[in-house]
Image: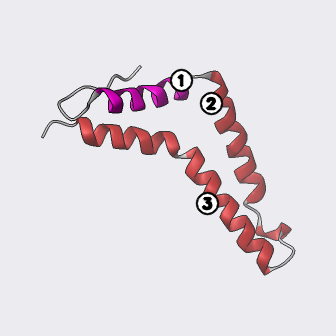
Amino acid sequence: MRQPKGPHLDKELERYYNNYFDLFNTEGYKQLISELQGNLLAINNIDACKDEADMYFRKGQLNVLASLINFETAIDNAYKEITEDD
């Protein structure tokens, strides 16, 4: 497990990152991401769109799914940024 360290982390921020790192290592989280990736593939097909409004609705769904799927990477990147030595 990644452990926050360095002069830029107080106890609250350390707990924040540790909670996410614990979450990312669970089977349930991995299962959720797998399901979301499957949903992304199913939604990412404009042939199934009924009209322009449906296409924009799907675009919104894809944005939300991408944010959730990439959340772990975003947290990792933020953690690395604040723990890098200056």
Q: Secondary structure at mark 3?
A: helix
Few, some or many C-alpha atoms within 10 Å of disc 2 (few <14, some 14-19, many ≥20)?
few
Q: Which residues are magenta?
A: 11-24
Q: Where is 69 relative to 43, above or below?
A: above
Please give the name of the residue rendered at 25% of the width and 32% of the height, measured from the top-left corner. Answer: 9
Q: Earlier in the sequence, mark 1 or mark 3?
A: 1
Callout 2–callout 1 Cβ contact below 8 Å: yes
User: What residue does disc 1 label?
Assistant: 25
Tag 1: residue type?
A: Asn
Please provide percent x and percent y for residue 85: 15, 36
Few, some or many C-alpha atoms within 10 Å of disc 3 (few <14, some 14-19, many ≥20)?
few
Q: Residue furthest bottom?
A: 52
Please give the name of the residue rendered at 72% of the width and 60% of the height, measured from the top-left corner. Answer: 44
Please give the name of the residue rendered at 75% of the width and 73% of the height, measured from the top-left corner. Answer: 55
Front position in the image: 42 or 80? 80
Q: Secondary structure at mark 2?
A: helix
Q: Where is 20 relative to 53, above or below?
A: above
User: What residue does disc 2 label?
Assistant: 29
Please provide percent x and percent y for residue 66: 59, 53
Q: CA distance from mark 2 to mark 1?
A: 7 Å
Q: Main secondary structure of the magenta part?
A: helix
